Image (spheres, grey):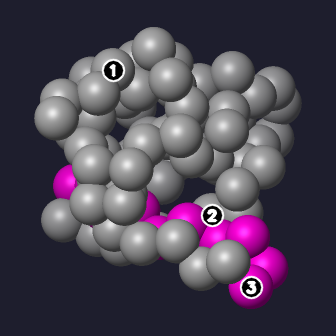
Amino acid sequence: MISIADLATAGSGRLTRLTGEGGHRRRLLEMGFIPGTPIRLVRRVDVGGVLELELRGCRVTLRTAEAQQILVEPLD
């Protein structure tokens, strides 16, 4: 398992676990970050350290620090 932030750009994986606590973890679950969900790293924006992710047909942007709490099993 690796964090989604460690995937190569355009890499994909299957979400296995969220390591955050409390409100942050709950917010991710509400947005669809549920274990077993396929997820793809669309692009990295170096200014501000932002990642654009695609899951469940939607695109979501997260800070790199938030994305490091999302663990995936690489599919590529």
- x, y percent for residue 2: 50, 23
Label placed on residue 62: 2
Q: Is residue 50 above or below residue 4?
A: below
What's the mark number on residue 47? 3
Q: Residue at x 29, y 27 (%)?
A: 74
State the residue at coordinates (28%, 34%).
Answer: 13
| Image x and y of residue 17, in percent | 51, 18
Looking at the rendering, which quadrant does residue 22 occupy?
top right
Toward which corner of the image does residue 76 lie, by quadrant?
top left
Q: Is residue 64 above or below residue 12?
A: below
Residue at 52 percent of width and 71 percent of height: 44
> Foreground residue, 24 or 46?
46
Packing grade of label 3 (10 A; few <14, some 14-19, many >=20) is few
Residue 52 among those drawn in magenta? yes
- Residues tagged 2 and 1 counted as in contact (Cβ below 8 A): no
Distance of mark 2 from mark 1, alpha carbons?
19 Å
Q: Secondary structure at mark 3?
A: loop
Say whether disc 2 or disc 1 marks the residue closer to the N-terminus: 2
Residue 51 in magenta stretch:
yes
Identify the amino acid type marked 2. Leu
Residue 5 left/right relative to 68: left
What residue range appears in magenta? 47-56
Decide: few, some or many residues near mark 2? Use Cα within 10 Å; few <14, some 14-19, many ≥20: some
Residue 68: percent from the left, percent from the top? 67, 38
Spatial CA distance of label 3 from label 1 is: 27 Å
Which SS type dominates the magenta stretch? Answer: strand
Mark sitting on residue 73: 1
Q: CA distance from mark 3 to mark 2?
A: 13 Å
